[in-house]
Structures are given as C-alpha cells and as structure tokens.
Amino acid sequence: MTYLIIHTIHLFAAFIYGGFLIADNLFLVHIKEAFSAEEHTKIRESFMKYVRKVVPPSLIVAVVTGLYLITQVFGPIAPEGMSTFQILLSIKAFLGIWLGLRGGLQVYFKIQPFVFKSHVLPFSFVITIIFLSQFMWIQ
C-alpha cells in the first residue's frame, strides 16, 4: 500500500513538472511572436509567478519519491549483469537526479548549474524519461 501511495504522488509530481516543461517549450515560446517585447515580459512574468510556487517543489517531490521507488523495484543484479529493465531504470534515475539537482540548485540556492540556462535540455530529458518508462517494461 505504501508503494502505491508513493507511486501515485510520484506520478502527480512528475506530471506537474513535465507538464510545465512541455507547455513552456511547445506553447509559451510562441508568445514572443504574438506580442511586443514588453507585453511578452509581462505575460511571462505573470505566468511564472504561479509556476515558481508549484513546479520546483513538485520536481523535488518527484525526485525523492523516485529514489524511494527505485529501491523497491530495482532488484538484485544477476551474475550475468543488469537486465534491460535495470539499465533503463538506471538511465531514468540518472536523468531524474540530474533534473532534481539542476532545479534545486537553481531555485533554492540561486545557482545556475550545469551551464544550461534554457528549458530545452530538461524538456528533452523529460521526454526521454517518458519514453524509457514505456520501454523498460518490455521483456
């Protein structure tokens, strides 16, 4: 039962974080085309005011719950090496931890880490995690 509750929390938190990145990279970038620079800045700041309250904590929750979940499903490594499931789960964990460190350092410590300042790389990581989540269960 604990696993199910934490997994549900993890999914909701990941949906909030990933949803923001998807909306930002696919839709919000086009605001520049429709409005003047001043209007764009005003609209973007109005949107980001709410994003800053919800998205960073959801990222941290997604990473922490993900770390718990990986301890529950990873399993022992066989003598012949890791299974495909374990390899893909490890890649997902690496990308998730990278996102969590980047987001935590940037938002809570005001450090612009890892050189990347746009949302394009985190967006691509989230898309990769989504695809890995689908493929890792294939035997």
Image (spheres, rainbow, N blue to C red):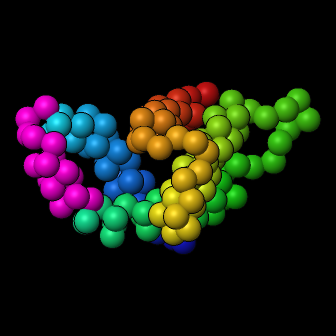
- Quick one: 104 or 89, which is closer to the camera? 104
Residue 82 percent across, percent down from the top left: 79, 35
Examine the rendered structure and indicate whether residue 125 appears above or below residue 61: above
Q: Quadrant of residue 66?
A: bottom right
Q: Quadrant of the C terminus?
A: top right
Q: Quadrant of residue 8?
A: bottom left
Report the residue at 81% width, 48% height from top.
76
Q: Main secondary structure of the magenta part?
A: helix
Residue 14 percent across, percent down from the top left: 42, 54
Report the residue at 27% width, 59% height from top.
48
Report the residue at 54% width, 53% height from top.
112
For this view, does 57 lie left or right of residue 29? right
Residue 125 percent across, percent down from the top left: 50, 37
Residue 68 percent across, percent down from the top left: 63, 63
- Counting every numbered tag in the picture gives 0
| Residue 10 in view | no
For this view, does 106 lie left or right of residue 9? right
- Quick one: 86 or 24, which is closer to the camera? 24
Examine the rendered structure and indicate whether residue 63 appears above or below residue 81: below
Please give the range of residues in magenta: 33-48
Q: Residue furthest front?
A: 38
Q: Residue furthest right?
A: 79
For this view, does 86 lie left or right of residue 10? right
